[in-house]
Image (tube, helix red, strand yellow):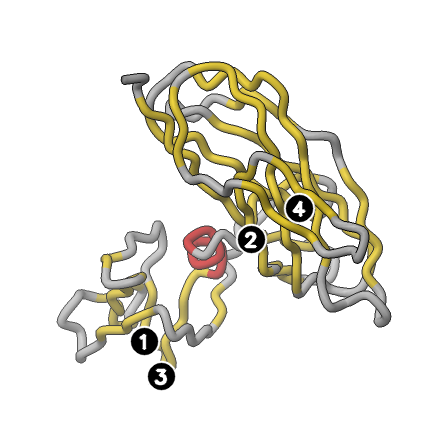
């Protein structure tokens, strides 16, 4: 019978507020439970954080998901990969590059109206580890259904170009036919599967 293994990792994040006193929050397998807040909000986990002999231990998968970090487990080497690059995404009408190589982002926006829309998504990628990375962007409607997947892109990072990269993805006549937030999710391929490491919302309003 295969044994399920719970992996815990001690992590300190400035965005977390740790609240611990004796066993005021109860116990988990004999250890005091620690409440965790993310940006001031209580964070519920399947397995609670615990005070392990004076050190706070947190379930790495739950914490990774809260931070939109990609998590992958290698059972052969007993290694957890936690990947969290810096990603910025902007919705623009277009990107213009002049003769001097200077880029101009034309009419950035955060919201639009219901209907078929054409625009560009500007991506800025930084702090990727050295190696080859495969990524894509998927769009989810307000109901959570995937309505569009971009092509898969390969990016080679080495010591000479580790500073950062940018790219624009063009969308033509994308059907934004529901009001609410559409989510553009930047996904990295980790261990042969795509994991979301960043998302940006586009608010769609009813036409006035």
Instruction: Please identify the quarter of the rendering in which residue 114 is found.
Output: top left
Q: Do the residues under discs 2 and 3 have CB atoms within 8 angstroms? A: no
Can residue 147 be seen by looking at this rendering? yes
Can residue 1 be seen by looking at this rendering? no
Closer to the eye: label 4 or 1: 4
Separation (CA) of disc 4 from disc 3: 36 Å
**Label ID, residue 53:** 3
Secondary structure of the residue carrying numbered label 1: strand
Quarter containing the C terminus: top left
**Along the polypeptide, which appears first: circle 4 or circle 1?**
1
Residue 196: give x, y in percent of width and height. Answer: 56, 44
Residue 52: give x, y in percent of width and height. Answer: 36, 77
Dot 1, how many residues are within 10 Å of its Cα: few (below 14), some (14-19), or many (20+)? many
Dot 4, how many residues are within 10 Å of its Cα: few (below 14), some (14-19), or many (20+)? many
Q: Do the residues under discs 1 and 3 have CB atoms within 8 angstroms? A: yes
**Label ID, residue 88:** 2
**Residue at figure coordinates x 50%, y 44% from the top left:** 199
> What residue would you read off at disc 4?
188
> What residue would you read off at disc 1?
51
Figure label count:
4
Closer to the eye: label 2 or 3: 2
């Amino acid at each position: 019978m295969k044994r399920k293994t719970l992996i815990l990792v001690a992590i300190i994040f400035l965005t977390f507020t740790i609240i611990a006193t004796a066993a005021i929050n109860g116990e988990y397998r004999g250890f005091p439970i620690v409440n965790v807040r993310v940006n001031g909000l209580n964070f519920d986990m399947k397995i609670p954080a615990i005070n392990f002999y004076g050190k706070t231990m947190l379930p790495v998968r739950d914490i990774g998901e809260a931070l939109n970090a990609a998590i992958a487990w290698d059972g052969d080497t007993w290694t957890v990969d936690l990947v969290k690059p810096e990603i910025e995404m902007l919705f623009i009408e277009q990107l213009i590059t002049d003769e001097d190589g200077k880029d101009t982002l034309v009419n950035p926006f955060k919201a639009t109206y219901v209907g078929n829309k054409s625009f560009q998504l500007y991506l800025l990628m930084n702090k990727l580890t050295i190696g080859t990375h495969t990524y894509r962007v998927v769009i989810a409607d307000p109901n959570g259904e995937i309505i569009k997947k971009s092509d898969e892109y390969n990016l080679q990072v080495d010591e000479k170009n580790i500073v950062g990269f940018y790219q624009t993805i063009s969308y033509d006549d994308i059907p934004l036919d529901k009001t609410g937030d559409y989510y553009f999710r930047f996904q990295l391929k980790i261990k042969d599967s795509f994991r979301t490491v960043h998302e940006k919302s586009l608010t769609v309003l009813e036409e006035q």
